[in-house]
Amino acid sequence: MQYPDYPSESSCYASINNRQMHYLEGGKGNAETIVMIHGNPSWSFYYRHLFTALVDKYHCIAPDHIGMGLSDKPAGGEYDFILKQRVDDLDALLSSLGVDNNLTLIVHDWGGMIGLAYATRYPEKIKRLVISNTAGFHIPSGKQIPWQLKLSRTPLIGALLIQGLNAFCRGGVIQCVTRKPMTSDIKNAYLSPHDNWANRLSVLRFVEDIPLDKNHVSYAVVDNVDKNLDQFSKLPILVCWGLKDFVFDRHYLDEWQKRMPNAEYHEFDAGHYLLEDAGEEVIPLIQTFLEKTNTGQIKYAEGQT
């Protein structure tokens, strides 16, 4: 299948933990590495325009998590669809590519927790962060879990909705943009990797992997990120936020502003898929932010921006 504006010439595969992991890679000769980490139910296609905009100046990497995008889609019992495994996969990929310093992480949705858990393992490798509609902490006080997520986590019903009816992916291409509907070719690009029951297992497992209590298998990883997030507060951080996100809503943005008061914030009248809704505004902001932090125009110190 042809994916609109997707830089297929940059497609690569690596054997990661006995699975074929697809990723985009370009600009190898450039000094700094930008890692773009997607969430659920998207894939590296989400970053296609940003990747193209940055690859001439930066070494860009945009992986597809196992079970997502163009990566292998293992069956249940063949792979641990949990947060720690996702972080291990990212760790293994970046290690295999020899990427180990001056990293900029660009994170979205569940990619935020994956990326920040990696950053918590290796804080010395992280130069700056670009954050949009994601979390690096437990669910904020006062935030109610949307009924859509609750229903999708219900045993049997969740599998029927997500794997059978493809409701989560189809809902994403409709509800996650608010400025203008996706064209049919863009919708199909988001949906095509998850074209049958088996290929939607990872989408379901991502939803189930949201830890709502201390007994959840991924709670400890989230808790560790939450407790260690402040160590990044002196880094250059850009936060771009779509205000019409019914999951990562104002509660999450307020928490980021509380945790990272020195970050640079931009709000948009846009949905969860911010780069689809407002990419023409967001991408130049990211480019400017990267340039300013390279030239020293932005210097972060305690209590100072």
Image (cartoon, helix red, strand yellow):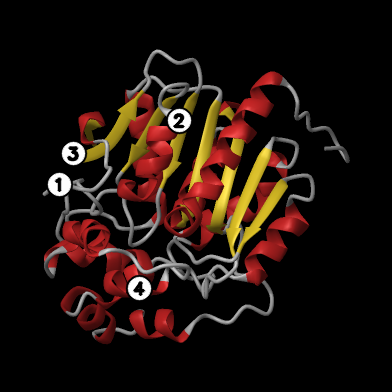
Q: Which mark is residue 28?
A: none
**In the foreground, 95 or 25:** 25
The C terminus is located in which quarter?
A: top right
The answer to whether residue 117 is visible is no
For label 1, the residue is 2
Q: Residue at x 69, y 57 (%)?
A: 256
Q: Amino acid at mark 3?
A: Asn
Which of disc 3 and disc 2 is earlier in sequence? 3
**Secondary structure beneath disc 3?**
loop
Counting residues from the start of the chain, the first of labels 4 and 2 encountered is 2
Q: Amino acid at mark 2?
A: Leu
Q: Residue at x 26, y 49 (%)?
A: 66
Give the alpha-carbon distance from disc 3 to disc 4, as whole Å.
35 Å
The residue beneath circle 4 is 174
Q: CA distance from mark 1 to mark 3?
A: 27 Å
Crowd around label 1: few <14 · some 14–19 · many ≥20 (10 Å): few
Front one among 173 and 84: 173
How busy is the neighbourhood of tag 3: few (under 14 within 10 Å), some, or many (20 plus)? few
Do the numbered discs 2 and 1 sit on residues whose CB atoms are within 8 Å?
no
Q: Mark 2 to mark 1: distance in Å?
A: 22 Å
Quarter of the image holding residue 110?
A: bottom left
CA separation in Å, label 4 and label 2: 28 Å
Is 267 located above or below residue 15 in the figure?
Answer: below
Residue behind mark 2: 54
